[in-house]
Image (spheres, rainbow, N blue to C red):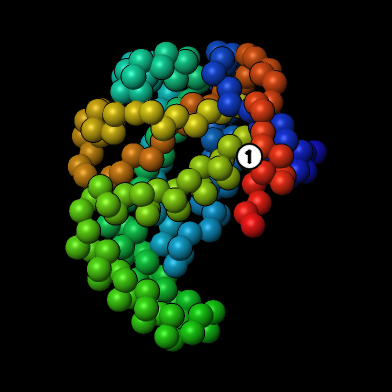
Amino acid sequence: MLTTKDAIEKRRSIRKFKPDPIPDEYITALLDAARLAPSGSNAQPWRFKIVKDRETKLKLAKAAYNQSFIAEAPVVFVCCADIKGYLNGTVSGIQDLGKIGAIEDRIVKIILKRVEKIKTMHIEELSPRIALNVAIAIEHIVLRALDFGLGSCWVRLIDEQMVRDIFGWDENIHVVALLPIGYPAESPPQRKRLKLEEILID
């Protein structure tokens, strides 16, 4: 069985997939991995749309500036943030953390004050804050997928409004990324990585 270190080292961005379907129990396991991710104030703003049908996958590929490989994946996870859910979850989550003594009362007050300020932000300013939480959940999916021999590829180059229009979503849903998933039909080498000393700041 893969260790976490193995998974991190083995992960690649896969853009060629076999047509083999992914069992539903694997998809459930991937969603459960996302569900267990950490989030600020335990707000858990992530929401996912699972897409398997060819027609919708083609529309998603078009919304991703015609990145055709997206439509070839057996499954595409549309990874989103629920903005109202984030605000409500932040309030209830931080209050719960305060009640159990996980954080000091003064920190609870600071965060609750910030939430009131966040509520007045325009969606374009607010979205990146929420996306950070969703990104953690997505990476949980990416790494867990390797347990089932599955590959994936983060896709951030998307026309968010086009994706929302496909599903009839309003601006409360912020589309963070598309995540096509399937059995790899390629084995790309690891891309060049910075050396350890290059990622440290003096």
Q: In front here: 171 or 117?
A: 117
Tell me what residue is drawn at x 23 percent, y 39 percent: 169
Q: Height in image: 117 above or below 50?
A: below
Q: Height in image: 57 above or below 143?
A: above
Q: In front here: 117 or 177?
A: 117
The residue lying furthest to the front in this view is 202
Q: In front here: 130 or 78?
A: 130
User: Helix, strand, or loop for circle 1?
Assistant: helix
Q: Classify mark 1: residues with Cα within 10 Å, few (<14), some (14-19) or many (20+).
A: many
Residue 45 point in image, percent of width and height: 39, 54
Quadrant containing the N terminus is: top right
Tell me what residue is drawn at x 20 percent, y 42 percent: 170
Is residue 107 something one can see in this rendering? yes
Q: Left or right: 79 with respect to 6?
A: left
Q: Height in image: 77 above or below 131?
A: above
Asked where in the image residue 129 lies, by quadrant, the reply is bottom left
Residue 44 point in image, percent of width and height: 43, 57
Is residue 25 something one can see in this rendering? no
Q: Height in image: 133 above or below 119?
A: above
Q: Left or right: 100 with respect to 167?
A: right
Amino acid beneath label 1 = Leu
Tell me what residue is drawn at x 62 percent, y 54 percent: 201
Tell me what residue is drawn at x 36 percent, y 49 percent: 128
Residue picked out by circle 1: 143
Quadrant containing the C terminus is: bottom right
Count of numbered circles on the image: 1
Residue 179 point in image, percent of width and height: 47, 31
